[in-house]
């Protein structure tokens, strides 16, 4: 049965014509002379993949004896690779070459890198070419990751519950660790390596101090050992008050010598157990978590203390910028910027500030976070959410590739910083598809700077994108990173639905190359996960690409946000307004009344727009120039405000809700057409989930319209009838 366990690594047999051509390039596997666990993993994966795809037991050879050999290794591990004098110089750590070459007059393919992990990544890429039915002839692929730290963040608790996790319990079986290492951990590492993810934070940012006790350090060390061959480093979330909770100290003040000593000792203890430990992720002074401000110290004081402890071991601190306080009357969307922007330049060398993609909280749509581009002296890393906390949990089909892409390609228009290093040299993926995908994206790159017909402000050249902040090129950052809050749990299919796996997949692909195209990645994923048949791939990709916009429409159209029912965030709750913390109430965000709707973030309102670079700020603050998709994020407008469509705002809002429902109906109908291409189990599950989604899209639409109709006192637009 197809239960989704194999993810995108199914390696099902290719069609006979492909089998023949691929077999000509996979006649022997020539292994490196010097072995390592990582090189062994690469060889094993090739054997497994080729075995499944081509039904060939490729075995292993010591030297090339004919055409069609596949040669694997680094110059250090393989004299054969060393002799070929390949252009390995331009590769970043983890980068690889896949090339068609000649050895002793024989036609061969090499998968070569400077480091073992690059060879493993190259092996997965080679298999991916067969999985996606691309040619293996005349290869000259050079690929390097554009971001150094490509991490999953698990919000997993030590009791195996998962905060905002919808795929069952945590996959970390803390009870049986460290002694029993479930085989699933290896498959987890394989899946991550296949998309280049190279680190994982095991526990929730709302951290339990116990994770840093010897018992749990041992468990984490056992996982680190399983992951190591796959280039996956372990990181932990640290609770700022741990010196008090597990260290017996009376304070966690970052300036207190005993506290500093405690963290130094703790870091040494962790590194003794996990020599390649990545570092700490910290949520401090946010949503009730302890932090340096409890002692009148700044975020920089807190982060630098931990950085001091980790620095000698090569570890980093990822300090989260997701802060807002209930007793701070400032617009929540402004608080992170207000707090952190003044600290630029004050962080130690091994601190990275981890910033969510938008200024509120993982909504179906938000403008990019104003900190991107605003902290040239502090490495910022991106935090995306892969789990769908605000997008219908596990059941709704929402492909997040377009969301990630929209954020990454947004132009910050911050060119007041050092000259871009130039992405071309570093985006060393010469594959033809890569170039095409980049070209396609270039063509429809959408800028938030001046619109068509307006004079382009000098700063909005399309060079200072959020991606260029994240890949470090805009500010020449010393560290780069991108994190995704994992959607992985104990469910047999890992992610709560097969289509949710695509979000894990696209996150990894965009972390490797933030310039990649969400559409191209969706197509690859579909081919690998379901079927390479183009009649299937094109229709299913259309469905995926439209799916996130559908969610935006039926939940929070036109720039609305945070209207989900309180606490669990599932289903509509725009009427909620009585919670003690004002910024947890949906009413705080939509501000709808008889006069109009929307959050005024212009100079007349909270002025959050002014946190962006001037050309962006100007556009966002203008009622006419603001992109429609952010309209009510930045503006409070009367219900009869006239929209470009010719409708008034009220009618447009109703129209959008309706459009969202219609799109889900279409997705359902389209999926039904795809039955011939999909196995029974996954076809039925997806269909059932789409039926849930359709029902709930109506619920969202009807409840939202009913509520806004009541507060606005308006009649339903002509032609729209109330639900039966
Ligand atoms: O999105 C919100 C979630 C919290 C989460 C918090 C955060 C881990 O509702 O559950 O806590 O953000 O990112 O810290």
Image: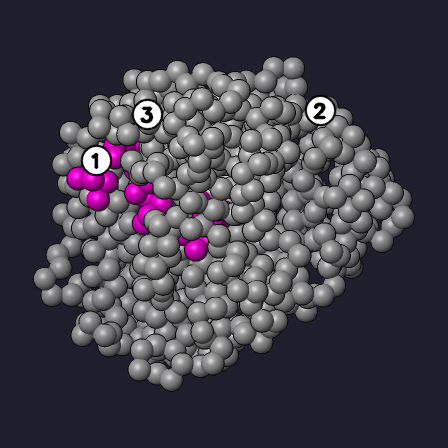
The image quarter in which residue 626 lies: bottom left
Q: Position of residue 95 (x, y in %)?
A: 54, 44
Q: Kindly give the residue lying farthest to the bottom in the view shown.
A: 455
Q: Looking at the image, what colour scheme do you see?
A: one colour
Taking the view exactly as shown, the residue that stands out farthest to the right is: 257
**Residue 18 drawn in magenta:** no
Chain-order first, disc 2 or disc 3: 3
CB of residue at label 2: within 8 Å of ligand 1? no
Classify 10 Å Cα crowding around label 2: few (below 14), some (14-19), many (20 and above).
some
Please indicate whether residue 422 sits to the left or right of residue 433 in the image. right
Residue depth check, mark 2 versus mark 1: number of the one nearer the observer: 1
Identify the secondary structure beneath mark 1.
loop
What residue did someone put label 2 on? 218
Which mark, by number, is residue 533?
Answer: 1
Say whether residue 201 is left or right of residue 522: right
Residue drawn at point x = 48 percent, y = 46 percent: 143
Q: Main secondary structure of the magenta part?
A: helix
In the image, which disc is placed on residue 687? none
Element carrying mark 2: helix
Q: Which residues are magenta?
A: 509-538
The answer to which image quadrant residue 125 occupies is: top left
Residue 279 versus residue 621 in the image, above or below: above
Viewer-nearest of discs 3 and 1: 3
Q: Residue shown at 67%/65% (left/top)? A: 377
**Circle 3: is it few (<14), some (14-19), or many (20+) Cα within 10 Å?**
some
The residue nearer to you, when weighing 443 against 710, is 443
Label 3 to label 1, Cα distance in Å?
A: 20 Å
């Amino acid at each position: 049965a197809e239960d989704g366990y194999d993810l995108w690594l199914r390696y099902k047999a290719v069609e006979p014509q492909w089998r023949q051509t691929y077999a000509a390039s996979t006649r022997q596997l020539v292994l490196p002379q010097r072995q390592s666990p990582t090189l062994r993993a690469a060889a094993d994966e090739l054997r497994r993949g080729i075995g499944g795809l081509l039904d060939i037991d490729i075995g292993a050879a010591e030297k090339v004896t004919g055409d069609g050999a596949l040669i694997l290794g680094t110059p250090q591990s393989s004299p054969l690779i060393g002799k070929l004098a390949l252009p390995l110089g331009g590769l970043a750590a983890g980068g690889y070459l896949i090339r068609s070459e000649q050895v002793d007059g024989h036609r061969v393919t090499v998968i070569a890198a400077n480091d073992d992990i690059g060879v493993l990544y190259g092996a997965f890429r080679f298999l991916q070419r067969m999985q996606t039915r691309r040619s293996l002839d005349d290869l000259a692929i050079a690929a390097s990751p554009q971001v150094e730290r490509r991490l999953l963040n698990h919000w997993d608790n030590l009791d195996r519950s998962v905060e905002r996790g919808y795929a069952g319990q945590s996959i970390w079986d803390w009870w049986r660790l460290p002694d029993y290492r479930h085989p699933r951990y290896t498959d987890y590492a394989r899946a991550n390596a296949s998309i280049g993810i190279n680190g994982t934070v095991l526990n929730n940012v709302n951290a339990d101090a116990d994770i840093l006790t010897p018992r749990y350090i041992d468990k984490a060390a056992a996982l680190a050992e399983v992951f190591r061959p796959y280039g996956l480093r372990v990181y932990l979330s640290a609770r700022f008050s741990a010196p008090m909770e597990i260290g017996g100290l009376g304070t966690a003040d970052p300036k207190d010598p005993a506290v500093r000593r405690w963290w130094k000792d703790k870091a040494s203890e962790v590194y003794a157990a996990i020599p390649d430990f990545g570092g700490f992720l910290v949520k401090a002074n946010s949503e009730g978590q302890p932090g340096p401000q409890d002692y009148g110290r700044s975020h920089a004081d807190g982060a630098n203390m931990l950085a001091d402890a980790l620095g000698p071991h090569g570890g980093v601190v990822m300090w989260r910028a997701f802060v807002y306080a209930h007793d701070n009357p400032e617009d929540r969307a402004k608080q992170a910027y207000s707090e952190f922007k003044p600290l630029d330049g004050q962080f130690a060398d091994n601190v990275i500030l981890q910033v969510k993609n938008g200024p509120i909280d993982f909504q179906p749509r938000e403008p990019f976070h104003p900190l991107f581009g605003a902290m040239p002296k502090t490495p910022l890393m991106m935090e995306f959410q892969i789990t769908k906390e605000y997008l219908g949990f596990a059941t709704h089909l929402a492909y997040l590739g377009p969301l990630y892409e929209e954020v990454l390609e947004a132009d910050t228009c911050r060119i007041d910083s050092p000259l871009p290093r130039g992405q071309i040299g570093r985006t060393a993926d010469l594959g033809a598809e890569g170039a095409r995908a980049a070209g396609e994206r270039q063509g429809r790159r959408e800028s938030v700077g001046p619109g068509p017909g307006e004079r382009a402000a000098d700063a909005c050249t399309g060079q200072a994108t959020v991606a260029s902040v994240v890949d470090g090129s805009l500010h020449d950052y010393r560290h780069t990173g991108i994190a995704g809050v994992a959607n992985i749990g104990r469910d047999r299919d890992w992610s709560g639905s097969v289509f949710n796996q695509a979000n894990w997949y696209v996150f990894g692909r965009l972390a490797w190359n933030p310039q990649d195209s969400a559409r191209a990645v969706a197509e690859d994923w579909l081919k690998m996960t379901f079927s390479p048949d183009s009649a299937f791939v094109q229709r299913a990709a259309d469905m995926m690409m439209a799916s996130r916009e559908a969610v935006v429409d039926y939940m929070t159209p036109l720039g609305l946000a945070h209207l989900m029912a309180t606490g669990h965030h599932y289903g509509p709750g725009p009427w909620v307004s009585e919670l003690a913390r004002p910024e947890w109430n949906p009413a705080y965000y939509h501000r709808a009344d008889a006069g109009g709707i929307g959050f005024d973030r212009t100079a007349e309102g909270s002025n959050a727009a002014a946190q962006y670079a001037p050309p962006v700020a100007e556009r966002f603050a203008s009622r006419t120039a603001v992109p429609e998709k952010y309209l009510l994020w930045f503006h409070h407008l009367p219900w009869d405000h006239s929209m470009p469509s010719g409708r008034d705002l009220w009618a447009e809002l109703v129209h959008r809700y309706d459009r969202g429902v219609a799109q889900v109906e279409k997705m359902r109908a389209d999926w039904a057409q795809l039955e011939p291409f999909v196995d029974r189990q996954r076809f039925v599950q997806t269909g059932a989930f789409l039926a849930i989604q359709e029902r709930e899209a109506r619920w969202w639409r009807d409840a939202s319209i009913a509520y806004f109709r009541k507060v606005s006192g308006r009649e339903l637009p002509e032609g729209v009838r109330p639900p039966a």
